Image: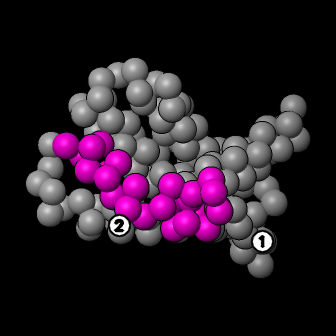
Amino acid sequence: MKRYQDFAVLLLRIAMAIGFLSAVLSRLGLLGKQSSGWENFLAYAEEVNSFLPKSFIPLIAIFSTFLEASFAVLLLIGFQTRKMAVGASILTFLFALAMTYSFGIKEPLDYSVFVFSMGSFLLATADNYRWSLDEYLLKN
């Protein structure tokens, strides 16, 4: 059973990393026609954070993009996994709350933002992170 749990933790880590990476690559225009682009991301960030002054939006967009890119890379290689998972959980939970405030509960549920947030939290509770840089560093 433990072997399956280790594999499930690995798959969760990879899925979360890919989710963050996809969002970042899209807003940076690196996914071709599938990209949303930076300007569209700024417009969406303004809608999601409708309760904040418009002047805050570029800073929030840059900061969230930096965090998402960091989470993607560090979760993928498995470095500081527990801390990255907690950070990812907090960031996505704040995103879900902002979406709920600005659009109502249906949109964050439709986009599974709460699921992503709680998946991140679940990853943070894992006993160990097999097949990760954390495990390698712990052994050496």
Q: What stretch is highlighted in magenta?
A: 24-50
Residue 133's quadrant in the figure?
Answer: bottom right
Give residue 98's position: percent from left, percent from top: 28, 39
Which sits in the foreground, 4 or 90?
Answer: 90
**Would residue 32 be counted in the magenta stretch?**
yes
* C-alpha span from label 1 to label 2: 30 Å
Q: Which residue lies furthest to the top in this view?
A: 106
User: Magenta stretch mostly in which secondary structure?
Assistant: helix
Which mark is nearer the camera, 1 or 2?
2
**Callout 1, which amino acid?**
Tyr
**Callout 2, which amino acid?**
Phe
Q: Which residue is drawn at 63% across and 57% down?
A: 33
Q: Which residue is drawn at 86% across and 37% down?
A: 4
Q: Mark 2 points at which residue?
A: 63
Give residue 31's position: percent from left, percent from top: 64, 62
On the picture, is 57 further left or further right than 22? left
Residue 3's quadrant in the figure?
Answer: top right
Q: Mark 1 points at which residue?
A: 136
| Labels 1 and 2: the sequence-earlier one | 2
Give residue 126's position: percent from left, percent from top: 65, 44
Q: In which quarter of the image is the C terminus?
A: bottom right
**Would residue 84 be counted in the magenta stretch?**
no
On the picture, is 137 further left or further right than 83? right
- Which type of secondary structure does the marked residue at label 2 adopt? helix
On the picture, is 83 further left or further right than 136? left
Residue 97 in view (yes/no):
no
Residue 136 in view (yes/no):
yes
At label 2, counting other C-alpha atoms closer than 10 Å, the crowd grade (few under 14, some 14-19, many 20 or more) is few
Query: Relative to 30, is 98 above or below?
Result: above
